[in-house]
Each structure stands twice: as C-alpha cells, then as structure tokens.
Amino acid sequence: MRVETTTGELAAVEADLHVLPQAEGDELPQALGEAAGAADVKHGFGKTTLLRPGGPERLLVVGLGKREELDDEKLRSAAAIATREAGRYDARSVAWSLADEALSAAAVIEGTILASYRFDRFRSRDEDDPAPVGVEVLTVALGDEADEAMSTAIRTAQVAAEAANRARELQNLPSNVLTPTALAERAEEIAAEHASVSVEVLGRSEIAAKKMGGLVAVSQGSAEDPRLIVLRYSGGGDGATLGLVGKAVTFDTGGISIKPSAGMQDMKMDMSGGAAVLEAVGAIAELGLGLDLIAVIPSTENMPSGTAIKPGDIITQYNGKTVEVNNTDAEGRLILADALAYCVELGAERVVDLATLTGAVLVALGSTYAALISNDDELAGEVAGAGERSGEIVWRLPLHAEYKKLTTGTVADLTNASDKRKAGTIYAGSFLEEFVDGKPWAHLDIAGTAWDIDREYAKRGPTGFGVRLLVDLASALAS
Ligand code: BES
Ligand code: MN
Ligand code: ZN
C-alpha cells in the first residue's frame, strides 16, 4: 500500500473514498452540513454513515464514540471498519481527515494495512469471481506539516504493519508449503534485501554436530529436515545487543503424545513466534534502527513415527542440562532451550523469546493479552511498554521457586512436562529460564494472541502478533 501525507482540505484530495472521523459532540464541517444524510450522522464507536456531499464522491463518517474513551487501539479498529466499507465500494484510494491532533495517523495506517490483509493465493479466480482490489493508496490529511517525530511514527507504522502482514502470510501457509526449509529461505531473502543483515542456516547434521539435543529430539520423527536459522542485524548504537528467539514448529502433531485430531489443522500456526521474529528483523533493518540484534529461530515439525522421540527418553540440551521428555507434545520448550542458550553464546546481552507455547495461556488470558514471564523488571517494563504502544498487549505472570521445583526431573536435571497440570504457562517459562545463563530475559507466550483474536483488523486466522511489538521495542532501545 502506498501511504501519503498531505495538509489542507480533505475535499481537495483525489480519492475514491474520503473518511471523516467524528467523536461524540464533534460538529460536521460547515461545507458538509448541507449534504444529504448529514443530519443522521452516527457518532457511536464504529458506526458509519455514508454522505454524498458533492454528487458522485463518497464521504464516510466514522463514529469514534466518547472522546475521553478514545485511544490508539480504538483508532486502529475504526480504520479497519472504514477499510471494510471501502471494500464495499471497491475503493482503491482512501483519504482520511486527521487534522485533529489527538488522532494518531500511525494508528490509522496500522489499522488500514492490517485490515487489508487477505490469504487468497490458493483460491482459483475467474471473471465471475475476480479478486477484490483493496486499498492501494492511503492518504492522511494532517492539520500541519508532519514534524520529524510524526514522520518517523508514520513510516514505522507502515513498515511494521506490512511486516506483520508478511508474518501472517507465513502463519497461514500450510505445513506442506512452509517447511523449515522454506522458512529458512525466507530468512535468506530478508538477509539478501538488507546489507545490514546476515544469515546462517544449520541443517540436520550441523544441528546434531552442535549437540542441540532438543532440536535433534523434536525433529527426529520427521522426514522434513529441521533448520536452525540465525539472523544478525548490525544497526550500531551504544545499547546492549538484543537477542530474539522465536519458536517455529511448522506443524505440531504432538508427536507420540499425539494431539486429538479435531482442530489439529490449526497447528500449522505453531511457527508464529519464529515468523514474528523473522519479519520483525526485516522491518527493523528496513527502518535502520540503531541497535544490534541476534535472532535465533529453531524450526522443525513435531511428528510421530518409528524414529520419533518417545515419552521417558532423556536428552541433553545445548547448554549441557539433561531433560526427561515425559510429554512429546511439550516440544516447543525443548527447541527453545537450545536456541536461547545458543543466542546467549553468540553474544546476546538480553533476550526476548516469542512462542506459541501452551494451551494454558488461552485459559488464563484468552486472546487479549500475551503472557509475559521475565527474570528482569527493567526488560519486562520495556516489553510491556512496547505492548501498550503497539496494542499487542502483554500481562506479566510470576516466577517463583515453587514453580521451578515442578520442573525438576526424577532421573534427569529437568522434566519437560509434569503430570500435575499446575500453572502450565509458568511451568514452561520456568523451564526456559534454565537456558538463559542469568541474562535479562523476557518470554512471551503468544499461543492465545497469534490466531483468531476477533479484533476488527484481524478477526479470524493469523495476527502477526509480536512484529509490531518488537519493532516498537527495538525503536525504544535504539540509540
Ligand atoms: N503448540 C502447542 C501449544 C498451543 C496450543 C499453541 C494451542 C497454539 C494453540 C504446544 O507445543 C503444546 O502442545 N503444549 C502443550 C504442553 C503440555 C503437553 C505440557 C499444551 O499446552 O497442551
Ligand atoms: Mn506441542
Ligand atoms: Zn507446539
């Protein structure tokens, strides 16, 4: 999507659809007072009214509800609602009136781009059923010329939202298309696009040679080759190197501890953390943010087979700790354990990981908040702040010695799952903490927020959760 800014009258902007946001109590501009339907304009949040002020052109009034309840997240939703309406009129160009400084242009851009995402590359089309055109140009008409901060915010919003849509495409791709190999190819593409990004990809034998026992164990049941993807971004600055780790299980059957078949098709999305990290690195490089990143993405299928890991098997992780694999469906923590330890060894001074790790987080927080678990208040605060600003909100859950005790193995150092079913999300976080060598670390369990969140800009299917949060975090940490 092309995004343009302008100043001055909305009516002067050439566009298929003009959008005028109106909070309760706002008065329509004088020139619109005469338009048919102007007296019936609805101001309630998300309500829309179409006016035809000068004949053919269309002006959509979007209600924002009570001004004191308005925030960026509501504006993202309002933009998504306007984008849907634009689709009804086949509008290719949309212009928003944002002269009101209280309304964030960045939020409108995010909502418009996110709401425009479609997954239809596998659908056959013909003349009777053409692909919808969608919004190709978005113009925001500002009250004043954008200053530097505003221009940065606008560009960041566009780059991050487009990267989120690319992550959504990866999430949507089925596991026979998006294999670990294909995901690694996407990483290579990102590195090829940016001189500041380099990539290294390890295959099955190299992963085994490095003694990454978790990734070896989870991948050994699958005919698909695993990949350990490492992306480095050199943006400079004087801050600490940030490590990013993302779980990328391209299909999670559960392995020998197999999942029920109902709904199993959704487990193609178990690579959502890895997709978010990958595309966030691309966006951060595109924006040229001033910090250094080391991203590590372990990618594999989790399959049952004659070569699969079995319940009770004992493995040795990359950092030397031993784990009883009592449940092969708790595979994410095994591959993340290696990736976290490797990321720290490569030089990450603080680490954020994203993973669709537990069904328990859906029980605890639904699809509203991702769970945040951290050993460091400062990093946790930075992550929570990025969550608030981006609308990808997180809620912190505690660590405690009693939870840690649950992860102790009976015959090995650790066990990957206990039969007690207590505090499943925290259990997984406590397990991961064993692999970060005491470095500041924040874990985001995105199993509830990566898919089917029922927001206006992402109703069903993938959300790209984490891309915008990570870009915001990197912006805040950059110097
Ligand atoms: N990939 C799943 C978690 C998940 C659940 C993601 C729902 C998205 C939606 C993960 O690998 C898993 O199977 N976790 C188990 C852990 C248990 C066996 C300790 C779970 O949550 O049931
Ligand atoms: Mn699993
Ligand atoms: Zn999984």
Image: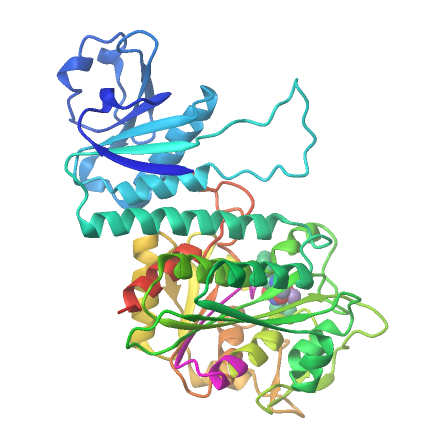
**Location of residue 64 with respect to 389 vertically, above or below:** above
Quadrant in which residue 247 is drawn: bottom right
Magenta span of residues: 342-359
Say whether residue 220 is left or right of residue 348: right
- Quadrant in the picture for the C terminus: bottom left
- Confirm whether residue 325 shows in the render: no
Q: Quadrant of ligand 1?
A: bottom right
**Location of residue 264 with respect to 321 vertically, above or below:** above
**Location of residue 36 with respect to 119 vertically, above or below:** above
Question: Who's the residue at 52% across and 53% down the image?
Answer: 167
Looking at this view, name the residue that lies furthest to the right. Answer: 306
Question: Who's the residue at 31% across and 62% down the image?
Answer: 475
Say whether residue 37 is left or right of residue 331: left
Question: Who's the residue at 73% across and 80% down the image?
Answer: 205
> What x and y, as percent, mark residue 314?
71, 86
> What x and y, as percent, mark residue 358?
56, 65
Quadrant in which residue 201 is drawn: bottom right
> What x and y, as percent, mark residue 138?
36, 33
Quadrant in which residue 62 is drawn: top left
> What x and y, as percent, mark residue 14?
31, 22
Which of 90 and 34 lies nearest the eye of the viewer?
90
Question: Who's the residue at 56% across and 62% down the image?
Answer: 187
| Magenta-drawn stretch contains 52 | no
**Location of residue 404 with respect to 133 vertically, above or below:** below
